[in-house]
Amino acid sequence: MTTEKTTKKQKLRNAEYYDFQMNQDELYRQSKDGKIFKHLVDIISSEQNIKLAFRNIKKNRGSHTAGVDNKNIEDLAKWQDEALIKHVKRKFQWYEPQAVRRVQIPKSNDSTKTRPLGIPTIMDRLIQQCILQILEPICEAKFYNKNNGFRPNRSCEHALAQAEKNMQLSKLHFVVDIDIKGFFDNVNHGKLLKQLWTIGIRDKKLISILSAMLKAEIADIGFPEKGSPQGSIISPLLSNVVLNELDWWISSQWETIPTRKEFKQHKGHSGGRLQALKKTNLKECRLVRYADDFKIFCRKKKDAEKVFIATEKWLKDRLGLSISPEKSKIVNLKKEYSEFLGFKLKVTRKGKYSNGKPRFVVRSHLSDKSMKKIHINAKRRISDLQKPSDKQESYKAVQNYNSFVLGVHNYYSMATHASLDFAKIAFPIGKILKGRLQGNISKERGICSEIIRKRYGKSKQLAYVYGFALIPISYVQHKTPLDKKLEINQYTPKGRMLIHKQLGQTINPDLLKYLMLNPIKGKSIEYNDNRLSLFCAQKGKCAITSSELTIGNMHCHHKLPLKLGGNDGYNNLVFVTIDSHKLIHASNPVLISELLQNLNLSATQLGKINVLRKQINLPIIE
């Protein structure tokens, strides 16, 4: 059973698997060309789209959480294909959502506070996924490039890279920080539906369905008059639709303002145009947004003050949203830090330019809240390391701690002074480790996976707990955040080619974390540790088909079985997909024929299967 959220890249694989990518490409192209869409429900309720929606939500962690009807993905999986498709099609004819279950969960930036999360029934989630798969390519064609949250192939790294570019290269040292008060709870339903209409989504039946979703009853509370429930599959897309109008309005004040003269762009840049704009009296302002967290960078303080007032008024008049006065402000980045996505940013003087003017570079740290959160979570995982019941539990607790440290290192290494910040965290954490684990922590070498040895092997702080390597929280190296290439786009053939090229060069960190947190029960420590090293060595791909390994579709196979004298050593293991593994062990001619048809192996790939079959004393497949 999967416990990890399906990645955006996996959804791309699924769309290609069901041959639905061409439909999404066409919707994206038509939306770019300004087409009006009036018959979308027919595509949304198509058999292909429903099957793709089921595949996408099947591996979503939230799909195992029940709604008010106490059903989850396992109940949905019991339906026959034809019956489920027929039922969903019928629901689209006259859609009435079931009540949404509301739960309170801790806020990510403050565990002492909670936020409401709406959990629709699993059938309503399937219907939302069907709609999302059609609306997303249409909306993607209309979204602003500096909007980075809840979008395919975009991340916090891209938002941070854009912010740092504005600060260091563009020399915009005044930033307008605006915090929208209760954004998700105050979205105006009528305004949102009009914005969808303006984008070109003018299928009245679909608009009616979306209206019903927004107004779905919240169990034990009632029917909401405003707001977009956090927790629904379609809510992130709708929140981007709401703020898309703000993005383009701010952009129209400077970056995309019409000019009398046409300026040619070179590789996505329009240097001549911007130089011409700088000679005018226009207020230079540039937006960077991630979800409802956004910043507007300005060159002058007086421009920032005017932009602040104008933006506050625009949000109130156009979207009916208020800002939080205590959290919204103008920051001089030469003097103060500005917080963004768990970091705090400012510029500091470093040398001079050739013309004698001072040069300013970005200085970034983990925010105080982030440091406190990391300390609390690390401390909790150290508690899990105390007095494990057996060797297996020891290994699991160490892997739990390591996966946490690896995760925070991967993200917060984007801070220029990450090493200094983690050193501050490491001092009290080190004292807690020594105090609580006492004789169970040492510098003597023990079991150390390849990924830890490669990344942390040079650290003098590398220690061993119960004989297993424990990642030193202080050992982190800065990684410069990089912006997204303009060409990367999962709804164009060229853009997808670049995505697949990246997939071939990198290991999915979420999947690696999943493997670390979920060792195979009943297997030896050696097996589970070598499983991690092997996954990295194979770059997360099947040794037979070279297809990407995913949660629920991978198996670490013993080349020589244990019962025939094999062992759990690294050289006796290989990662393959589930169907490849079935074919290695299959003896039934009918099953072999079905698997060969599904896998469509080349002669070389079949040769690899036969090598593995020989080792388990099975006849080769001709």
Image (cartoon, rainbow, N blue to C red):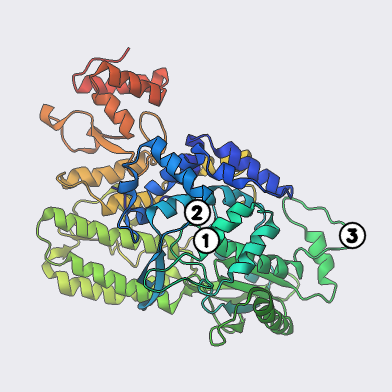
Task: Quadrant for the C terminus, please.
Answer: top left
**Identity of the amino acid at label 2?**
Tyr
Residue 297 appears at what percent x and percent y? 66, 74
**Identity of the amino acid at label 1?**
Ala
The residue that label 3 is drawn on is 261
The Cα–Cα distance between marks 1 and 3, rounded to whole angstroms, is 47 Å
Secondary structure, mark 2, is loop
Q: Residue at (51%, 44%) from the top-left corner?
A: 502
Query: In the displayed structure, does residue 579 sit left or right of residue 267?
Result: left
The Cα–Cα distance between marks 2 and 3, rounded to whole angstroms, is 51 Å
**Which of label 2 and label 3 is nearer to you?**
2
Query: Circle 2: is it few (<14), some (14-19), or many (20+) Cα within 10 Å?
Result: some
Name which quarter of the figure residue 110 lies in. bottom left
Secondary structure, mark 1, is helix
Contact flag, marks 2 and 1 (Cβ < 8 Å): yes
**Identity of the amino acid at label 3?**
Lys
**Residue 322, above or below 616:** below
In terms of sequence position, does the residue under pointer 2 or pointer 1 come before the other?
Answer: 2
Label placed on residue 212: 1
Asked whether 23 or 3 is in front, the reply is: 23
Query: Circle 3: is it few (<14), some (14-19), or many (20+) Cα within 10 Å?
Result: few
Q: Residue at (25%, 43%) from the top-left corner?
A: 530
